[in-house]
Image (spheres, grey):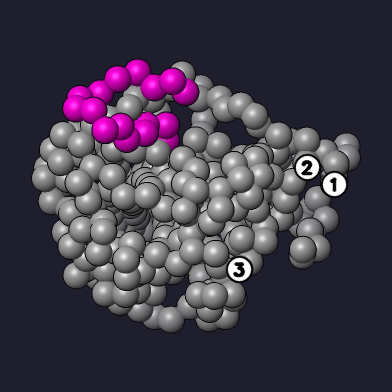
Amino acid sequence: MSQLPSAEDFKKLSHELKDLLREERRKKDVGKYLSLGALAKIKNVGRLIVIGDLHGDYGSLMKILSETGLNSKIPEDTVVVFLGDYIDRGYESPHVIYEVFKLKLREPSSIVLLRGNHEGPPELPVYPHDFPLHLNRIYREQWREVYDAIASCFNYLYACAILEGTLFMVHGGIPTETKKLEDLINANNEIALLEELLWNDPMNEIGKAPSPRGAGYLFGPDITESFLKAIEVKVVIRSHEPCNEGYEVLHNGRLITIFSRKGPPYFNSYGAYLDIHEPAKSEDAHQIVSKYAKRF
């Protein structure tokens, strides 16, 4: 496990990240993707790596970075999308968020950071939220300043990402009513829409239903099909739910759940991530996971 910086250096790093994310919104063309409010529109790249929930699992993060070569210079044809939930439920949450922030600052045009429900706004609280406890353990009386600096970045994380014609990526799920990409651009300022993107889960039944989580909805394969047709992509990639095998395909091959944390408190047998080559040629979820899902 890496050494964490001092409280002052962690705050400085967080402020630098927030400034970088603000600048992305201002200039819009980041290089490998377009920054359109809460939506990141990824250009046609040769390789797309997608990492699901980490929840403070530093070991899994380091394994993924090592296996994919992300510890060194990221190639020009590669983009990495993190699907959120970097913190909570894990003893090493401070280490995970620190490494992810460092990676984004080191390779700004190659890394797309989505927000999960555990990086949501105060209006959408989560439980457990033990990240402050781990910061307090490390930084003592300075924990609140470090926490506030880190949390100030969350509203500048993207709510979703798209690779045009192929993939829609989000932490929780697709919105049950919205059918236009233009609406997603303002998602960080529209609480009802943001709640669905961060909290929704797929179900096998048709239609939608209240979520047992107490936030968001359950959505059926008909809603997935309608949304993908409207935005002209083929597959949803999301996280938010543990999978014993590390990934799961649902909704007639139109949706993938990918989960990168391994072990307690979920005790899933495998964590997984996607390392997709020529992502623009992806056809359906079964083809993607059979060729590009990496389990550990």
Question: Nearer the observer, disc 3 or disc 1?
Answer: 3
Residue 68 in view here = yes
Q: In this view, does 137 lie to the left or right of 290?
A: right
Spot occupied by residue 47 in the image (x, y as percentages of width and height): 35, 74
Residue 102 in view here = no
- Look at the image and say whether residue 200 sits in the magenta stretch: yes
Residue 63 is labelled as 3
Quadrant position of the N terminus in the picture: bottom right
Give me the residue at 49% from left, 35% from top: 117
Give me the residue at 43% from left, 81% from top: 75
Q: Distance between the residues labelled 3 and 2?
A: 23 Å
Seen from the viewer's position, the closer of residues 187 and 3 is 3
Residue 138 is labelled as 1
Quadrant position of the C terminus in the picture: bottom right
- Look at the image and say whether residue 73 sits in the magenta stretch: no
Q: Is residue 217 left or right of residue 229?
A: right
Q: How far apart are marks 3 and 1 (CA)?
A: 24 Å
Could you classify mark 3 by the number of other residues whose Cα lies within 10 Å: few (under 14), some (14-19), or many (20 or more)? few
Give me the residue at 45% from left, 67% from top: 294
Determine the secondary structure under disc 3: helix
What type is the residue that disc 3 sits on? Lys
Q: What stretch is highlighted in magenta?
A: 198-213
Could you classify mark 2 by the number of other residues whose Cα lies within 10 Å: few (under 14), some (14-19), or many (20 or more)? many
Residue 135 is labelled as 2
Spot occupied by residue 109 in the image (x, y as percentages of width and height): 43, 68
